[in-house]
Amino acid sequence: MDPEAERRYVLSLSCPDTTGIVARIAGFLADAGGWIVEAGYHSDPDTGWFFTRQVVRAGSLPFDADELRSRFAALAAELGGQATWRVTDTGVPKRAVLLVSKEPHCLHDLLGRVTAGELPVQLAAVIGNHDTLGDIVRAHGVPFHHVAFPKAGSGATAGDKAKAFDELRGLVDQHDPDAIVLARFMQILPPQLCTEWAGRAINIHHSFLPSFVGARPYHQAYARGVKLIGATCHYVTADLDAGPIIEQDVIRVDHGDTAVDMVRRGRDAERLVLSRGLRWHLEDRVLVHGNKTVVFH
Amino acid sequence: MDPEAERRYVLSLSCPDTTGIVARIAGFLADAGGWIVEAGYHSDPDTGWFFTRQVVRAGSLPFDADELRSRFAALAAELGGQATWRVTDTGVPKRAVLLVSKEPHCLHDLLGRVTAGELPVQLAAVIGNHDTLGDIVRAHGVPFHHVAFPKAGSGATAGDKAKAFDELRGLVDQHDPDAIVLARFMQILPPQLCTEWAGRAINIHHSFLPSFVGARPYHQAYARGVKLIGATCHYVTADLDAGPIIEQDVIRVDHGDTAVDMVRRGRDAERLVLSRGLRWHLEDRVLVHGNKTVVFH
Amino acid sequence: MDPEAERRYVLSLSCPDTTGIVARIAGFLADAGGWIVEAGYHSDPDTGWFFTRQVVRAGSLPFDADELRSRFAALAAELGGQATWRVTDTGVPKRAVLLVSKEPHCLHDLLGRVTAGELPVQLAAVIGNHDTLGDIVRAHGVPFHHVAFPKAGSGATAGDKAKAFDELRGLVDQHDPDAIVLARFMQILPPQLCTEWAGRAINIHHSFLPSFVGARPYHQAYARGVKLIGATCHYVTADLDAGPIIEQDVIRVDHGDTAVDMVRRGRDAERLVLSRGLRWHLEDRVLVHGNKTVVFH
Amino acid sequence: MDPEAERRYVLSLSCPDTTGIVARIAGFLADAGGWIVEAGYHSDPDTGWFFTRQVVRAGSLPFDADELRSRFAALAAELGGQATWRVTDTGVPKRAVLLVSKEPHCLHDLLGRVTAGELPVQLAAVIGNHDTLGDIVRAHGVPFHHVAFPKAGSGATAGDKAKAFDELRGLVDQHDPDAIVLARFMQILPPQLCTEWAGRAINIHHSFLPSFVGARPYHQAYARGVKLIGATCHYVTADLDAGPIIEQDVIRVDHGDTAVDMVRRGRDAERLVLSRGLRWHLEDRVLVHGNKTVVFH
């Protein structure tokens, strides 16, 4: 198959709603001969905002992605100063950096999916605050870095932790990644990193948020006696486990499941929810507005 | 709230795909000042067809539904002779006729939903080939008609059955219903009625089609030892249980469930699947192409 | 079929765990010729408690339910003073009283299920703090009582409310019901009634608890931007929405769902979760220990 | 923790049902001081068979697994000649051999789960009829063998294929595995191997059986327009895709999913269903009777 035939430009836009936006965007694309293969629209009645995502065959346009961006910028400007938009090119692979600790299941799952060609991303690096998972990462041909974090109760100062985060930031930022995935990374990002990586740092929390924020959510779930456990993929913000939710799912448990069983069984939800959330992020399906997401499936 | 503010026109269209269709429709609506509150698009790469559904605030247009139809007809004509389309007005209630036998659960569920205002439809009549369910229908203020069908093995001729179907058809057609719902109706519609009611007759089959076509599907499922049972809502065609599928869902069973348990437990899937499929049909979310459906959620 | 062949005795027991309990109970039943058709066991490693539920064909025992109770009491006494147990007879129908306000969907669903023979219970009465739902209740042949509660902000005293609850209590208690179902009843039971009806009062809360306790949970869910909404069936305790959970389930939502859509769509979860929880309660499948439940499916 | 404290014996038994079986087994275990931590029972009303699975703390018994087997054999003999039973020891790791072709996702998933300690099994070997997946297998420290199968249309004779299967059988049988997992292995086992490996060969089929038996099930599903796709884990028999079902699950699709999308998305169901089915098999939770399974969760 001609790879250009499959190459696509993905336009996404948010702006205050008004009549005629769809017509303008569609008209703009039609005038250029653009062949739309996917289109999603959402008008939010509460906030009065409009959201769209359009996928166009690259080969149907007589110009390249940069020219598309420049022309689309002009159109977006006419929609008012609050509009935010982006144009990405599926011919330019996205890059991700994974942050891990010792829990292997989400890492294994993502490595398997990337190796199998299921996720449209290049793994630029994996960084661990332990080196437990280094071997399997390198076996997949992906660079692994170990950044030592001070242990809780080790007498380390806040400065030691800040230094570790500085090292981490350097290792991440050199790749300018499209996604920074906290794949069961057991350190809380400092507020400054949350800000710098806003909209790119993605976490998997092992509960059905907003239930069971913070540590040991399966043990909290066990104590409450819930009949379903869950996992939540969300953008990282300075508010712990309170960022915009991308995806959630649940798994049925019963009285025979101990907290340890829940930890094991919940991994299936974590794997699926993180891989789905990450895929949608990489495909530019997720638009953030306030503390909520619009996800165009 | 001003009811007119909530009144909407729903446009749906299928036609061979080409560039610029979205622009034309969106431009047409924008030129008239139309405020689009929902828009769905689908390009089918295999068939080369395009499908759309648009929802416009009635009050945003300077003309009524008939004028909208007449103007949209002109636009559709330019999209080629194969285009099919419709414009409906949420201010004009849809009408449904329900066909039932003795099984009460789907009937009870639909009566409850309509009474509670959950389904946007008027129940014009319920027709049963038994009179078992007449009382509860009348208690909801809906007319009930009993049409006697010859019993299997009663020595009745094919003509007796044809006569019963003629009576049924008369009772249905006098209401010119938007939906004819076979809510566990245990008679097979003759081919001619399938044709006349094409796209309006909706059946609930108590299996996850295409598994277990025909009679006693739960008993078939039990014999095969499946771990999930299901239900399928589909348009009726002359091919038994083979029409375009609108919606399906499943319920987990295990070795402890007898065929009788499956019959009971499967009702939850039947109720949900039928009520969802019917809702989507009534909201003009379902476009049929060949033997498949596009469902704009 | 001989109805006695289907009549069963259901034994359930909780006690501190030790070796040999299963052998004792099984031996007791075997010695009497009891034919066990269902048996569930659970050992809780955290609390050190043991739970069982056994279903025996009534016709396989040479004595009646009272004699079974008297013999089983002797056995239970040997298991220590903390054991709690009961023996019920499926030949003696359970009775339920439903409490409702204006929301009709759970009521309709339960009426439909009882009428269709899906739930093993007699509806002794429905009591509403509004009379909105009286007609449909009476159409099903079930007595309806209206108990007027003082309106919020009406200047009514706490005494007025207490009087209304006294009237409610009288109407409920005259039936000595096995289940008191709060089918979207919008009044908070006073602590004394929670105590008196402990283990019999069942509520449906329209969220996936422990998320979104209290009022307007769908609006809370909408504000948080969750991707699944849920419902929880639980025993009522004096702690609002914090009693032992019997059953939960969820429904997927997306950015296109307003809070009003969630209210409507969530009803499907409420109906299913309440009907499942109530069925399990009526079949003596639910054993409460502390603030958690063991549910033998 | 003392590992012996966690070591368990798992007893499973099927036999014609009669009164007193539970009492005999429970009495036998109680007399020996056995501490039962899990117990499942099932009486099948149709076939008149009884099934049980009991899990006993190894340390609670005054003898070892072999002595337990010998004593249990005597008890089973008293239950009649048709009884089948087994006693396994969680202190003796189970062994599995995986058979693969080119599709990597189930292999990656199982390797990840075994490495993470999620599945109670040793991977003795992976055998591929292609060598595509050898590197990742070896990176996990598991032996990989490539057995060349004649290509379709290559002029190879039936004898060439039989020779390949002989080689495969030798490589498998040398490990005397408890599970032979066809992890998307694209060769049909000859009837003799199905017989020899009966109850140990486990396949994952990429449809919701009995729908879409045989080749390209996702393309069959796409053509039929189903709204859910599925996967089925079953024991291999000489009847293609018709063996006893262990586990099934489904994933929602819509009109926007092409057959290629279904292939990709269905992998999530395949991974989960295979890993669950395999776990239950390894934990001796699955008892086969006729063409159906009893699965004690």
Image (cartoon, coloured by chain):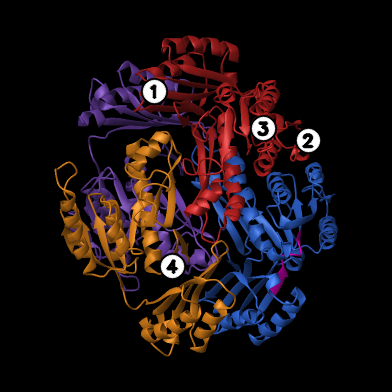
Chain colours: A blue, B orange, C purple, D red
Of circles 1 and 2, the one toward us is 2
Q: Marks 3/2: CA distance?
A: 13 Å
User: Does label 1 or label 2 sit earlier along the sequence?
Assistant: 1
Q: Residue A238: horizontal and vertical position, in percent?
A: 69, 64
Q: Which residue is mark 3?
A: D98
Quarter placement of the N terminus of chain A: bottom right
- Indicate which disc residue C93 carries: none
Chain identity of mark 3: D
Q: Amino acid at mark 4?
A: Arg
For marks 4 and 1, give the one nearer the viewer: 4
The amino acid type, in three-letter code, at marker 3 is Leu
Mark 2 chain = D
User: Which residue carries the number 4 mark?
Assistant: B285
Residue on which the image places disc 1: D49
Q: Does label 4 lie on the same chain as label 2?
A: no
Between C263 and A41, the residue placed more toward the observer is A41
Give the residue at x 51% y 50%. D221
**Spatial CA span between label 4 and label 1:** 49 Å
Q: Secondary structure at mark 3?
A: strand
For the C terminus of chain A, the quadrant is: bottom right
Dominant secondary-structure state across the stretch colored magenta:
strand
Nearest to the observer: residue B26 or residue D78: B26
Q: Residue D286 location in percent, x, y?
A: 51, 29
Q: Amino acid at mark 2?
A: Arg
